[in-house]
Image (cartoon, rainbow, N blue to C red):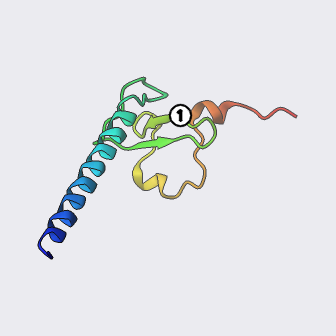
């Protein structure tokens, strides 16, 4: 009677793995539609991207001249467009 238990656990583990793979695919699809706010090109996983904390648009680091090392020291990133906007009284 103990034999079916490990099989049941194994099938649950396989189901969990499938769900994880589906989540990964959803993330890829979500990022695949992301466009750079500067150049308009699509998201690439091999490129550094940064998000503006004001308008929440994503940018290639190279398009806004931000390196990953420099980004680590930025508390709140403002894209060029938001940086040029002046707050109104």
Total marks shown come to 1
Outermost top residue = 40
Q: Quadrant of the N terminus?
A: bottom left
Q: Mark 1 points at which residue?
A: 57
Residue 13, relative to residue 62: is it above or below? below
Q: What element carries label 1?
A: loop
Q: Where is residue 10 in the image (x, y as percent from the top left)?
A: 18, 63
Q: Position of residue 88 (x, y in %)?
A: 83, 32
Of 9 and 51, the residue lying toward us: 9
What residue is shown at x 24% (from left), y 49% (from top)?
18
Q: Position of residue 42 (x, y in %)?
A: 36, 28
Of 34 and 83, the residue lying toward us: 34
What residue is shown at x 30% (from left), y 49% (from top)?
19
Q: Would residue 46 appear left or right of 76 to someone viewing this image?
A: left
What residue is shown at x 43% (from left), y 33% (from top)?
63
**Residue 78: quadrant of the picture:** top right
Local crowd at mark 1 within 10 Å, few (<14), some, or many (≥20)?
some
**Residue 8: quadrant of the picture:** bottom left
Residue 2, relative to residue 35: is it above or below? below
Q: Would residue 69 appear left or right of 87 to someone viewing this image?
A: left
Outermost bottom residue = 2
Outermost right residue = 89
Residue 87, relative to residue 22: is it above or below? above
Outermost left residue = 3
Q: Quadrant of the C terminus?
A: top right
Q: Would residue 61 appear left or right of 88 to someone viewing this image?
A: left
């Amino acid at each position: 009677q103990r034999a079916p238990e490990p099989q049941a656990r194994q099938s649950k583990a396989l189901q969990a793995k499938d769900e994880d793979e589906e989540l990964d695919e959803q993330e890829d699809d979500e990022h695949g539609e992301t466009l750079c706010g500067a150049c308009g090109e699509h998201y690439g996983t091999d490129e550094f991207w940064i998000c503006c904390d004001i308008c929440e648009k994503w940018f290639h680091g190279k398009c806004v001249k931000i390196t990953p090392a420099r980004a680590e020291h930025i508390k709140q990133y403002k894209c060029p467009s938001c940086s040029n906007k002046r707050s109104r009284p």
